[in-house]
Amino acid sequence: MENKLEKARSIINRVDEQMATLFVERMRACELVSEYKKEFGLPVLDQSREDEVVAKNSAMIEDVVLKGYYIDYLKHLMSVSRAYQYRLQQGLKVAYSGVEGAFAHIAAGRIFPESNCVSYRDFQSAYDAVVSGTADVAVLPIENSYAGEVGQTIDLIFSGTLFINGIYELEIHQNLLGVPGATVQDVKKVTSHPQALSQCHEYIKFRGFDTEDANNTAVAAKTVARLQDKSLGAIASKETAEIYGLEILEANINKSGENTTRFAVLSKVCAVSTTFSNSVLMFTVKNEAGSLAKAVSIIGKYGYNMTALRSRPLKKHSWQYYFYIELDGTTDNQAGQNMLDELNGVCDQLKIAGTFAPHSEL
């Protein structure tokens, strides 16, 4: 006999299914509204119309307590509708960390060339913008071939709710930039991100430049453009030079030609595509001897090749770690499901952090 909980869940499942269908129908109507507003130059927000909808629809709820919650529900629904209309009219909103001209900005623009790229002060803020719905996706660095993994981004992916839907490789070329009219001989000091200065250490030593740290390469270029001092150069990209009106005094000065940063595209939904052939798993193992070895053995048992395996410390537990793994293959098949079932037996936490197409160069 069906108990109260089972009966309630059955009702909720039925209603949720109907609401999902109606939600899509409502959003399709919003597309027509957006087209009309765009055609006639009307703003997305029509406060009087929204007030009218709230008053009219809430009048259909007789329960006084539920009416208050229904008003909150309507307001949130219309907020979602506005966000969708803004996206239709203005394009995809892409969050990145840094200022215009930073490598994250360059990567975001190349991945989403028709998008509206929005700058945020740090990785956390860019990530949170997607969680809150202020932005549609975030483009954040996860690894550099010279400096290694970007731990802050990996930590956000592990502890947060967003999924990786793409990993793209941006080859980094560092250049010496100066104000118009300056020459290499004029430059006495260079400013850039410490990592960029390190990458160009041999060149800087050869030229005898003094150095000054900056928050990132684009900030360095912006500073040089503002000061208009021929003796001060910046180390940054070609795109940054164009943005801030600087000239390339010497190109490709980083000591290693193998300098590539991998950027992850993060969104609320785990995308599915026939072009995706790689997966990201993140997990913690039980505090038992051989637990990690068992997990790795299970992955190999089902024919998955690990292309990356990294450990990161758990922030709330000293001397305990979680693991980040990239796999050749996806888990949306029987072998993948069997693997995940077995991993659940040896892992305390396990999540599919996303799927992507490998080696996508920008």
Image (cartoon, rainbow, N blue to C red):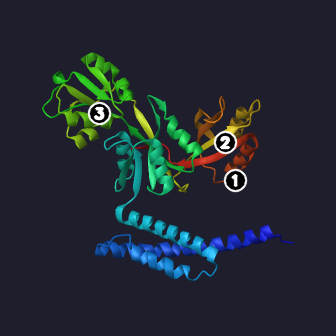
Nearest to N terminus: mark 3 or mark 2: 3
**Distance from the alpha carbon under mark 3 to that under mark 2:** 47 Å
Q: Is residue 256 visible?
A: no
Above/below status of 189 relative to 320: above
Identify the amino acid type marked 1: Gln
Residue at (65% x, 30% y) in the render:
318
Name the residue type under label 2. Gly
Q: What is the secondary structure assignment of the residue under circle 1?
A: helix
Q: Which numbered disc, 1 or 2, marks the residue that appears first in the sequence?
A: 2
Q: In the picture shown, does residue 359 fall above or below 114?
A: above
Front tag of 1 and 3:
3
- Residues marked 3 and 2 touching at CB (< 8 Å): no
The span from disc 1 to disc 2 (Cα, nearest Å) is: 12 Å
Label 1 to label 3, Cα distance in Å? Answer: 51 Å
Q: Residue furthest right?
A: 1
Q: Residues within 10 Å of mark 3 (few under 14, many from 20)?
A: many
Up the image or down, 276 lies above or below 258; here it is below
Nearest-to-viewer mark from 3 and 2: 3
Residue drawn where x is 16% and y is 23% of the image: 186
Q: Is residue 309 left or right of residue 2?
A: left
- Residue placed most toward the observer, 226 or 327: 226
Q: Secondary structure at mark 3?
A: helix
Check disc 2 and report its element: helix, strand or loop: loop
The residue to which callout 1 is attached is 334
Residue with the mark numbered 2:
303
User: Where's the N terminus, which quadrant?
Assistant: bottom right
- Label placed on residue 220: 3
Q: Quadrant of the C terminus?
A: top left
Q: Is residue 340 above or below residue 29?
A: above
